Amino acid sequence: EKNITASTLLSSTASLLSNTRLQPNILSIVRCPDANVGHYNSSTLNTVNFHPGSDEDEPLLLTAGLDKTLRFFKINGTEGGEKIHGVHFPHLPIHCASFLGNTGNVVVSGRRSFFYIYDAVAGKMDKIPRIQGRKEKSLEKFTTSPDGNLIAFIGNDGYIILVEAKSKMWVADFKMNGSARAVSFSPDGEFIIASGSDGEVYRWDIRTKRCVDRFKNEDGTISSFLSVSNKFTAIGAESGVVNIYNSSSSSISGAAGQSFQNRSPIKSIMNMQTSVDFMKFNPNGDILAMSSRREKDTLKLVHMPTQTVFANWPTSKTPLSYVWSLDFSPGSKFMAIGNDKGRCLLYKLSHYHA
């Protein structure tokens, strides 16, 4: 019998562990047939969104855009997507659509004072004519809480409007000084983070409805988008700069020495020359995708453990066109990208298939 020493066992375990971590610089990525092949949008694809509770190997994806149609696809990597269902909203060019947590319900909105909640299981469409007490003529930007219980709409004059998904009723308003441009729930669903024209980042406790933290984004220009993971908060600006902050240092609810103090980003990513219009962390927070709608083929993927941009992808030959939307599937096995041509590009992230 071979004499296996502790050191050889440890070294083999170490190499095994290093292989399970996502490596920087070179991303192993494979293009699949388009997710919506055969069912392309006749307009810009404003939204692509995976159902967070769907099967990791064959996830459920929705697409939506200005052609007023919400489409559902079952993703099979080798064959792209199989269309399951489509529903037309006659009076609503769709700007935003999202699954409500693990439920079968979808919120659908646009530049209108009303929005819809579509029950994809029952096939029932529920129109909410307006949000009580609010006079917004557009509800085109919103985000949903991880558990699907709440919807946060970006309103007029610096207001974030909180609506309960089940009752479809107004719950609370959160007010910031500038106009609101970006909003996100924290991954645990306990906080709302927002930023906008004043370049300040606000954090509200949803339970107490109080602002528990506020600081100036170091870039100083208008905040255009933000995304939050368990570890990091990424603030994108119209200048193209993306600042990365530790989420932990800005999530202590009013703890002495932590909140309401200016802080420096742990990293400023300056790989984009135009406004940051979209950002998304993958489910485990290892990758941050960031893109702009203003310039063709503008998409970068950041390796978050090292805060460096992957150098090998996308290439000059990657057929991105103008990127309008993006999402990672549960387990990060797939990445879907919606563009101005109505195509939903589909990529397999090989690391997560290992």
Image: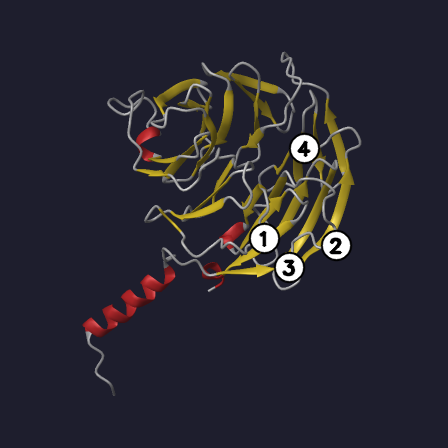
Q: Circle 2 sits on which residue?
A: 38
Please name the residue shown 67% across and 43% down the image: 63
Q: Is residue 345 above or below residue 9?
A: above
Q: How far apart in space, not on screen, are marks 3 and 1 (Cα)? A: 12 Å
- The residue lying furthest to the bottom in this view is 1
Q: Secondary structure at mark 2?
A: loop
The mark closer to the camera, 2 or 1, is 1
Camera-nearest residue between 171 and 286: 286
Q: How far apart in space, not on screen, are marks 3 and 2 (Cα)? A: 10 Å
Camera-nearest residue between 312 and 95: 312
| Crowd around label 2: few <14 · some 14–19 · many ≥20 (10 Å) | few
Please name the residue shown 59% across and 54% down the image: 346
Please name the residue shown 74% across and 54% down the image: 38
| Crowd around label 4: few <14 · some 14–19 · many ≥20 (10 Å) | many
Picture disc at residue 319: 1
Q: How far apart in space, not on screen, are marks 3 and 4 (Cα)? A: 26 Å
Residue 253 shows in the view: yes
Q: Is residue 164 above or below residue 99?
A: above
* Three-letter code for the amino acid on which mark 2 is drawn: Gly
Q: Earlier in the sequence, mark 3 or mark 1?
A: 3
Q: Secondary structure at mark 3?
A: loop
- Label 4 close to label 1 by CB (< 8 Å): no
* Three-letter code for the amino acid on which mark 3 is drawn: Pro
Horizontally, residue 24 falls left or right of residue 1, namely: right
Q: Secondary structure at mark 4?
A: strand
